[in-house]
Amino acid sequence: MDQAENLRKIMQQKEEQAKEAARVIAVTSGKGGVGKSSVSVNLAIQFARMGKSVVILDADFGLANVEVMFGVIPKYNLSDLLYNGRELKEIICEGPEGIQFISGGSGIANLANFDKEQVKRLINKMTELEKIADIVIIDTGAGINPSVMEFLISSPETILVTTPEPTSVTDSYALLKALSMTEGFQGKNTTVKMIANRVSDAGEGKNLYEKLSMVVSKFLNINIEFLGVIPQDSYITKAIMKQKPVSIMYPNAAASKQFEAIAKKLSGTQQDVSDSRRGIRGYFKNFFAKKNV
Ligand SMILES: Nc1ncnc2c1ncn2[C@@H]1O[C@H](COP(=O)(O)OP(=O)(O)OP(=O)(O)O)[C@@H](O)[C@H]1O
């Protein structure tokens, strides 16, 4: 390597260090249909309006709601990066307001079965996200299946979406119980933040949080923080019918205002995470830790 090349490399390294690692946030729920994708997409929009560059990884295999909510049909998905030699920039799709997203496609379902070389390629490619994203939102599947657990266990910050329906509350508990029993789970490494969706008023949301948080801290030794409420709002459904997120279609709707408040609250807090788990590289390294890459 000549001196000029060496210098270029050092400059590049310095640039990469100067750019902070992306904040990785997983969004999940105990059962399907409670508003997980709606939360991912609308928080992304609110973060983008605050000047952040946001990438959503739609890891909800089989129910790719993000693309439906954005009204965009992706040309490629994660499988094309994993198996068909596509580059990261080719599989990233443009959503509204500068948001970018990656459709997981069937690539997501196979992640846990990768061999070492595939894992390395995935980590290296996904690490390129670090250069373009301030925030990476991972929209996981719902429920307690092992692949959802893999996504959550590696995430330093998890948003749990719950509604007042009794089944949503018991399924949230079941999800956290499954998470606490998953190999490698360490309560101190995982912050779970709850959003109460489809509530009739703030009090109902707070009650829901207090109930869930009490049993979860008593029986599972997990602390949940309260992020806030999203009201039951017919504008959400109206917007979905038009394949537009409510924050874009009806920015003054009660739900949009709450998404804005929650995004502000989140961005006002630093992510409390050790260096080895920081950023998208840390996330995937941790995800595949058992494979010793
Ligand atoms: N606060 C709300 N007010 C009214 N309707 C809502 C609200 N939140 C979600 N919905 C409705 O619930 C439906 C499911 O929402 P969404 O697709 O975001 O859920 P999900 O948890 O991601 O579902 P899935 O498990 O299928 O991925 C949407 O059609 C939406 O209209």
Image (cartoon, rainbow, N blue to C red):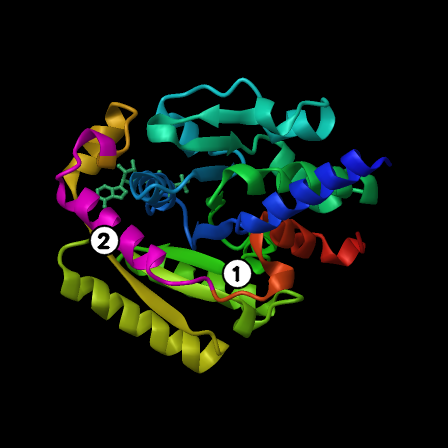
Magenta stretch prevailing secondary structure = helix
Which quadrant holds residue 120? Answer: top right
Q: Is residue 285 above or below residue 114?
A: below
Q: Which residue is mark 2?
A: 261
* Rendered residue at 33%/40% (across/down): 38
Residue 35 vs residue 86: left or right?
Answer: left
- Callout 2: SS: helix
Residue found farthest to the front? 3
The front one of 273 and 111 is 273
Q: Amino acid at mark 2?
A: Ala
Residue 171 vs residue 242: left or right?
Answer: right
- Callout 1: SS: loop
Query: Residue 108's spot in the image, x, y percent?
Result: 61, 38
Residue found farthest to the right? 1
The front one of 146 and 270 is 270
Other residues around mark 1 within 10 Å, as few (<14) / some (14–19) / many (≥20): many
Q: Amino acid at mark 1?
A: Pro
Query: Residue 189's spot in the image, x, y percent?
Result: 55, 69
The part of the chain drawn in magenta is: 248-271
Q: Is residue 249 magenta?
A: yes
Which quarter holds ligand 1?
top left
Q: Which residue is mark 1?
A: 156
Determine if residue 69 is in view: no
Which quadrant holds residue 98? Answer: top left
* Rendered residue at 31%/40% (across/down): 42
* Rendered residue at 52%/37% (across/down): 132
